Every structure is written in structure tokens, then in C-alpha cells.
């Protein structure tokens, strides 16, 4: 098979790494790709959101399958354009993608289809939004409605912080993504991430993980796109996964189909496991980042048949995936100042491309190659240092040992990834 993988981040590098191992693969092209992906696949400098150019590339390379990595390409309508061109695509349509691209849409969708979630309100003006805070006690959850690279969420500990977040979002702090804000009830419990595939009719659970959203140790600091993950997550018991499947995932797939947008691809259900069962925090219409990285490290089965089946309506022909017994962890390295407005981009990273052993994997998330061949850091998340091990502690030790050998004064990372599981 000729496969086109769309995207350039750590998630896409992990997917490329796993796809490249498939005996079904003839050629893998990543667009636009990154320096890490360039070592295992062809890359083409085509932006993920350049729909016309991506379709043209798929046609030129005679792609049998296109795999959409980032949500931005879903919002741009890439899956719709590929379907019109007769090219199989793993990734939902723009209409189905509203489950991520608009938090207000998703909240109303939950109301229509009776999915358990938090109480909420949607606002386009500061005064009514601030008045709505009276309904809740702190902490307050303030979200930009649209896509904000995982940074459009504020957990405000005080009323003043909540009102400042409302002013920032509605005042243009997140551009068009913040034209509306969603204010939510703060849920108490433990956050977990669960994934499922769908081919428009049939669905299949596809693993889970636990993320660390806050920037600093001890779950302190601002929300980010994710500073690290691990799997398996003890909170995702068989009972919790079954409850999430029946109360959240299958009703979501049935709901979008009933509304004229059958879902094809993967859905990422971020949920709070409460005393009353799992409740939806948000849906993402792609593999999580950095959750995908640990999923791929633990996936024993060939990934390609699942991608192809979801894209072509043949998921019912496949059995559940097989997972390795080992644990996996991912630690994100980001530039100092992330996720603020002025992270220290452009610094040189040394030592990240060394051989750290067969159980350590470095996925590139935001790197470029300098004129002299140096690895250059971007302004968002930059590297994913991942490892496997017989236990989470072993995997964690391997990851942090590798980080200690990377020379990047301009970067930082959390030192406590996996603390919930290790503290049990």
C-alpha cells in the first residue's frame, strides 16, 4: 500500500514509526513531516491544511490510503475533499469533526444525545459570561470554543482569574477560536483518555492512556497540549472502559451518524472518572498528542489494517487489537516560556539523535533542521522522549535517563510524569 500521512508533530512521527513496520506498506509519504519522520519516510513540504495540495499529492503518489493526523486538517475539510476524489481516508469529515472544533457544538450535542457531561453555558459577551460564574464555586473552567492547540482552557482558582480569562478569550487572546467561550462546572475525579475507531457503522475500542496537562510538576501552572503520558492507566479498569463505551463513545458515533455525518477515523474521549461514572470533558477527532506515542509503543498488532478498515467500512472484519504487556511513558520537552506567548524558539538541541537503546524512542514534535545540520527547536512542544519497560517505573527510569543525555539549555520538562500510577 502507498500511504500518505498528513502532519508534522510527535503524534504523526509515532504513527509513521508504527506504519513503517507494516508488511502491507509499499511507500510512506509524510506531508509536511519533520526531521525525525524524514529518517523513516519520504517527506513533502505540503501544509496539513492545504487541502488542494494534499489531494494533489495523494493523487500523484497513487495513495491507497490517507491518514489525517492533526485536527486542523479535519477542520479544513481534507477528508471531504479526499472522498470527493475517490481516495480512502482515515479521518472524519468536517461536519463530524465539529465534535472537537467547536466545544459549544459538542456540549449541545451531548444534550441532544444524552451523553453525561458537566453543566455549562456558552457566551459571546463578557458581562453575561461573568454573571454565569455565580452558578459555580471555584475552581472555574473557562474554554475557548474553537481550536487553540490544547491551550484554550483555563482552570481558574479564583473569581478574578476566571473573569480575566473571559476577558482574554473574548478580547481576542485566542483569535477566532475565542469568539465564544464555554464555561463549565468543575468535575471532581481522575482524568483519563480512551480511544475508539469507527468506520461509519461499526466501532472498536483502541486503547487508553493518562495525560498530564499542566505545565509544571505537581500539576501546577497553565494548561498545555500535554506534557507527558503513560499507559496502561490504572484508572481505566475494564468497568470504566465499558461504561465509557456505552455511555459516551457509542452514543457519540450513533449521534453524528443520525445527524448526517457518519464518523470514520479515531475518536479521543477525554473524560473525568467520577464517583457517578465517566463524564465527558471533551472529544478530539484524532489520536491524542502525546497519548498516541504511548499507544503506538504498546500496540503489538499491525496498525495499518485498522486504519484501512476504518477508512473503508470494514472494521467489523477485525478483532480487538493486541497490546504488549509492557508499560510505556512519554515525557514532553518544550522551550522555556511554553505555553506562554513568547517561548524561546530557535535554540539548538544536541544529543537527541543518539542511540539510547532499543527501549527508548525519540519522537520529534516541533523541530527543524538548521543550515549546518543542527536540530532546531520550535516554539511549541519540541521532543517526545518515550520508553517501554516491564513496569512503569522501569520505563520511566529509561526515559529520564535519556533526557539527562540531551543537551538543550533552552528547554524544560516535567519530572513527575506517571506520578498517579506510581503513587498507587
Image: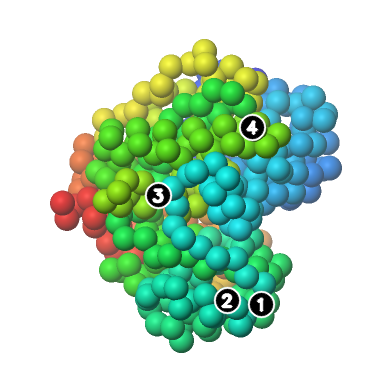
Label placed on residue 129: 2
Residue 20, given in percent of the width and then of the height, sits at 54, 29
- Residue 350, percent across and down? 46, 61
Of marks 1 and 3, which one's residue comes earlier in the chain?
Answer: 1
Tag 3's secondary structure? strand
356 on left or right of 249 = left
Task: State the CA–CA distance, disc 4 to disc 1.
Answer: 33 Å
Task: Check contact, mark 1 vs mark 2: CB within 8 A.
Answer: yes
Asked if disc 3 and disc 2 are in contact, CB closer than 8 Å, the reply is no
Which sits earlier in the primary sequence, circle 4 or circle 1?
Answer: 1
- The circle on residue 257 is 4
Neighbour tally class for label 3: few under 14, some 14-19, many 20 plus, Cα within 10 Å:
many
Q: Nearer the viewer, residue 161 or 321?
A: 161
Q: Check disc 1 and report the residue beneath it.
A: 125
Q: Residue at x 59, y 23 (%)?
A: 201
Quarter of image, res 127:
bottom right
Task: Give 268 or 376, whichever is nearer the viewer.
Answer: 268
Task: Measure the alpha-carbon separation of dots 3 and 4.
Answer: 21 Å
Label 1: how many Cα within 10 Å (few below 14, some 14–19, many 20+): some
Q: Earlier in the sequence, mark 3 or mark 2?
A: 2
Labels 3 and 4: the sequence-earlier one: 4
What is the spatial separation of the Cα atoms under label 3 and label 2, in whole angstroms? 23 Å
Label 2 secondary element? helix
Left or right relative to 119: residue 375: right
The residue where tag 3 is placed is 279
Residue 310 occupies quadrant: top right
> Is label 1 in a helix, a strand or a loop?
loop
Q: Are marks 1 and 3 in contact (CB under 8 Å)?
A: no
- Residue in the picture at 31% in, 29% down: 324
Amino acid at each position: 500500500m502507498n500511504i500518505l500521512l498528513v502532519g508534522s508533530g510527535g503524534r504523526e512521527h509515532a504513527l509513521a514509526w508504527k506504519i513503517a513496520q507494516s508488511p502491507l506498506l509499499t511507500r510512506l509519504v509524510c506531508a509536511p513531516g519533520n526531521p525525525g519522520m524524514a529518517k523513516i519516510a519520504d517527506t513533502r513540504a505540503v501544509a496539513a491544511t492545504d487541502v488542494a495540495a494534499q489531494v494533489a499529492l495523494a493523487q500523484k503518489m497513487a495513495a491507497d490510503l490517507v491518514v489525517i493526523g492533526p485536527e486542523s486538517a479535519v477542520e479544513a475539510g481534507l477528508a471531504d475533499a479526499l472522498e470527493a476524489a475517490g481516495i480512502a481516508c482515515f479521518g472524519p469529515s468536517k461536519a463530524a469533526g465539529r465534535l472537537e472544533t467547536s466545544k459549544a457544538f459538542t456540549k449541545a450535542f451531548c444534550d441532544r444525545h444524552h451523553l453525561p457531561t458537566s453543566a455549562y453555558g456558552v457566551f459571546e459577551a463578557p458581562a453575561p459570561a461573568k454573571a454565569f460564574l455565580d452558578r459555580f464555586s471555584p475552581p472555574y473552567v473557562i474554554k475557548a470554543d474553537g481550536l487553540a492547540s490544547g491551550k484554550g482552557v483555563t482552570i481558574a482558582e479564583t473569581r478574578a482569574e476566571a473573569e480575566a480569562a473571559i476577558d482574554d478569550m473574548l478580547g481576542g487572546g485566542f483569535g477566532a477560536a475565542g469568539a465564544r467561550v464555554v464555561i463549565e462546572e468543575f468535575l471532581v475525579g481522575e482524568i483519563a483518555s480512551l480511544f475508539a475507531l469507527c468506520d461509519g457503522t461499526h466501532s472498536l475500542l483502541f486503547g487508553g492512556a493518562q495525560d498530564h496537562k499542566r505545565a509544571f510538576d505537581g500539576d501546577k501552572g497553565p494548561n498545555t497540549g500535554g506534557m507527558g503520558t503513560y499507559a496502561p492507566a490504572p484508572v481505566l479498569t475494564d468497568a470504566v472502559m465499558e461504561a465509557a463505551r456505552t455511555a459516551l463513545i457509542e452514543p457519540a458515533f450513533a449521534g453524528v451518524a443520525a445527524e448526517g455525518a457518519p464518523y470514520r477515523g479515531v475518536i479521543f474521549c477525554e473524560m473525568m472518572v467520577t464517583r457517578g461514572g465517566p463524564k465527558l470533558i471533551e472529544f478530539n477527532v484524532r489520536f491524542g498528542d502525546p497519548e498516541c506515542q504511548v499507544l503506538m509503543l504498546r500496540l503489538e498488532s499491525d496498525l495499518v489494517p485498522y486504519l484501512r478498515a476504518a477508512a473503508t467500512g470494514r472494521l467489523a472484519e477485525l478483532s480487538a487489537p493486541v497490546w504488549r504487556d509492557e508499560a510505556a511513558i512519554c515525557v514532553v520537552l518544550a522551550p522555556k516560556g511554553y505555553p506562554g506567548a513568547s517561548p524561546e524558539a530557535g535554540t539548538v538541541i544536541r544529543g537527541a539523535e543518539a542511540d539510547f537503546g532499543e527501549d527508548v524512542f525519540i519522537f520529534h514534535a516541533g523541530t527543524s533542521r538548521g543550515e549546518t545540520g543542527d536540530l532546531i527547536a520550535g516554539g511549541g512542544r519540541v521532543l517526545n522522549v518515550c520508553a517501554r519497560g516491564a513496569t512503569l517505573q522501569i520505563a520511566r527510569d529509561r526515559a529520564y535517563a535519556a533526557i539527562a543525555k540531551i543537551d538543550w539549555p533552552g528547554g524544560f520538562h516535567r519530572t513527575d510524569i506517571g506520578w498517579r500510577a506510581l503513587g498507587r
